[in-house]
Image (cartoon, rainbow, N blue to C red):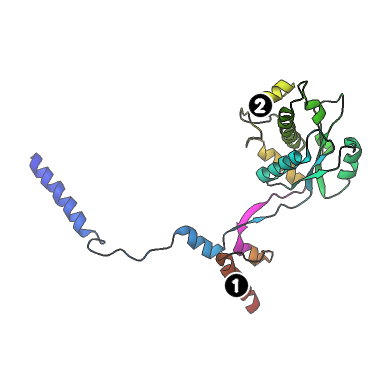
Amino acid sequence: MKEMKGMRSLVVLVSAWLMCPCWGQEAGPVVPDARSNNLYRTGGGILIPAKGPVIKIVNCQADVKFPVVAETAAEIARITRLPVVAQDMGSKKDARSVIGRLLSDTNVAAVVIISGVKDEPPMLIAPEARWAIVNALALKDKDKDSAKQVSRVRKEIWRAFAYVMGASNSSIEQCVLKPVFSLEDLDNLKPQTICPEPMNKIMAQAARLGISPARMTSYRKACEEGWAPAPTNDFQRAVWDEVKGKNNNN
């Protein structure tokens, strides 16, 4: 009985093998991969720039060098896709004296000032007034460890940005938005940036301020809407010529 079952199984396998349409035939033509097809069809992705007023990260101190401030602002812009820009106003500028002037510009949504003032806390937040101040001088310890101070300033810029943009303390362990009540608490924070949890709050706040984050679209769509930059590769050039040709014929 077992031998009969074995023979039946063998017959089924051989029959299936012989009935295979590809048996005894040469391989067909190579089909371009899906990514190439998509590139030919759409021209690839292109970033739609963020719209609306900017968030300014403004340096008014000399303890921590401006490139640190600029790098942190660029990191915030890259991660959130919001229009965040850095500005150096020099160490002689009083932080509070420039806030009103900066926010009087309708192209500025909010400001985070990096100051260096004695006897003031590490951070002052006025989210309803759309400003925050990070005091680099208060983030310096007795050992005057510049690397530690730089790390603290980076974290506090992120925290100030998040607070002024509507975020709050996070319950997620791997997030810079944990409760901080001392310099030791700040040093004990392992992450350097926010986690995904507060992103919805930041985006909601950005929308209330009239900001649209950068987003991806196809090069074809950009051509059809009339704002695409000149093509930089064959895929984009093909889409450019096709769309322009259609427009000229209409």
Check disc 1 and report its element: helix, strand or loop: helix
Q: Residues within 10 Å of mark 2 (few under 14, many from 20)?
A: some
Quarter of the view holding residue 182: top right
Q: What's the mark number on residue 115?
A: none
* Residue type (three-letter) at the residue carrying disc 1: Asp
Q: Contact, CB < 8 Å: mark 1 with mark 2?
A: no
Q: At x 52% / y 65%, what residue is drawn? A: 40
Residue 187 visible within the image = yes
Query: Which span of residues is magenta-colored?
Result: 210-221
Q: Residue at x 63, y 73 (%)?
A: 244
In the picture, residue 187 is in which quadrant?
top right
Point out the image quarter for the C terminus. bottom right
Amino acid on which disc 2 is placed: Leu
Between 124 and 157, the one nearer to me in the picture: 157
Q: In the rendered view, tell whether residue 156 sits above or below residue 87.
A: above
Pointer 1: what residue? 241
Q: Note whether 249 is above or below 219 in the view shown.
A: below
140 horizontally vs 217: left or right = right
Side of 223 where 54 appears, left or right: right
> Compared to 121, does 243 lie above or below?
below
Query: Which x, y percent locates residue 66?
Result: 78, 40
According to the picture, the residue beneath numbered tag 2 turns out to be: 189
Q: Residues within 10 Å of mark 1 (few under 14, many from 20)?
A: few
Q: Position of residue 60 (x, y in %)?
A: 85, 38
Residue at 81% from the left image edge and 44% from the top image edge: 87
Left or right relative to 164: residue 193: left
Residue 116: percent from left, percent from top: 84, 31
